[in-house]
Amino acid sequence: MVGDSGSAAAKIDELARLISDVAARTPAEHDASPTASGKRGAAPSGRASEVASAKEIALRRVDRRDYSRGELTDYLVRKRQLDPGIVAEILDRFVEVGIVDDARFARNWAQERARTRRLSRRAISRELSVRGVSEELIEIALDQISPDDERQAALELCRIKARRLHGVDRQVALRRLSGQLARRGYSTGVAMPVIFQVLDELAE
């Protein structure tokens, strides 16, 4: 997923700085001073090590592609079983410096899914919601897809699917195309006019 070009350089610089910060840590930095009990200081040392480890895991993850905060939280807490408090602390910092930006993520996700998968606004909204993006940011991201854009995407998708339907009974083709567009989230109001147009094209 391609991010905004204006912030790309700053994001890369900050990513490199954070990676260097993690790499520069040594075991000595995390060693706690001995105390009379021999136990005090162990918890802070353990937490510092856990923070460094969690940060490194998170940085490696975001180096692959852009992620929403919800996706990263799910990955780090549920799959990697990291401490939720530490994860929240790290992601707060990532948001602060622009490494994680749900508005940017939603905008780019909507553009990409509409262009490459020809998904409807409804389907894109579901995908973003599953990834933890707020309803407000989803609405803003979907504003860039006009009704005409959505109809054109449905038409292109329908034409692609119809290539395999030459010689198929019109009613059978109608049912198949209806199901295929419905699975991409298109409403009947958008899908049916497009399907009839494509079926008429096939009959010519």
Image (cartoon, rainbow, N blue to C red):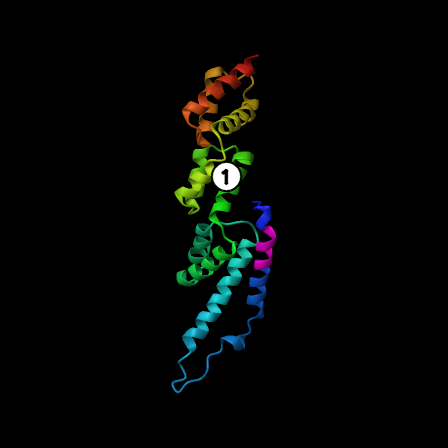
Q: Residues within 10 Å of mark 1 (few under 14, many from 20)?
A: many
**Which secondary structure dominates the residues rendered in magenta?**
helix
Q: Residue furthest bottom?
A: 36
* Residue name at image x 53 percent, y 19 percent: 198
Q: Residue 188's spot in the image, x, y percent?
A: 41, 24
* Residue name at image x 47 percent, y 32 percent: 120
Q: Residue furthest front?
A: 6
Vertical relation: 199 (above or below) 26: above
Vertical relation: 33 (above or below) 173: below
Q: Mark yes or no: residue 175 visible.
A: no
Q: Quadrant of the N terminus?
A: top right
* Residue name at image x 40 percent, y 42 percent: 136
Q: Quadrant of the C terminus?
A: top right
Vertical relation: 181 (above or below) 34: above
What's the amino acid at mark 1? Ala
Asked whether 31 falls inside the magenta stretch, the response is no
> Relative to the observer, which residue lies in front, 177 or 122?
122
Q: Residue furthest left?
A: 37
Q: Residue 80's spot in the image, x, y percent?
A: 46, 59
Magenta highlight range: 8-14
Q: Which residue is mark 1?
A: 110
Q: Mark yes or no: residue 170 visible.
A: yes
Asked whether 11 falls inside the magenta stretch, the response is yes
> Relative to the observer, which residue lies in front, 171 or 193?
193
Vertical relation: 172 (above or below) 138: above
> Relative to the observer, which residue lies in front, 155 or 95?
95
Dot 1: what SS? helix
> Relative to the observer, which residue lies in front, 71 or 146?
146
Q: Residue 199's spot in the image, x, y percent?
A: 51, 17
Q: Residue furthest top?
A: 204
* Residue name at image x 42 percent, y 23 percent: 189
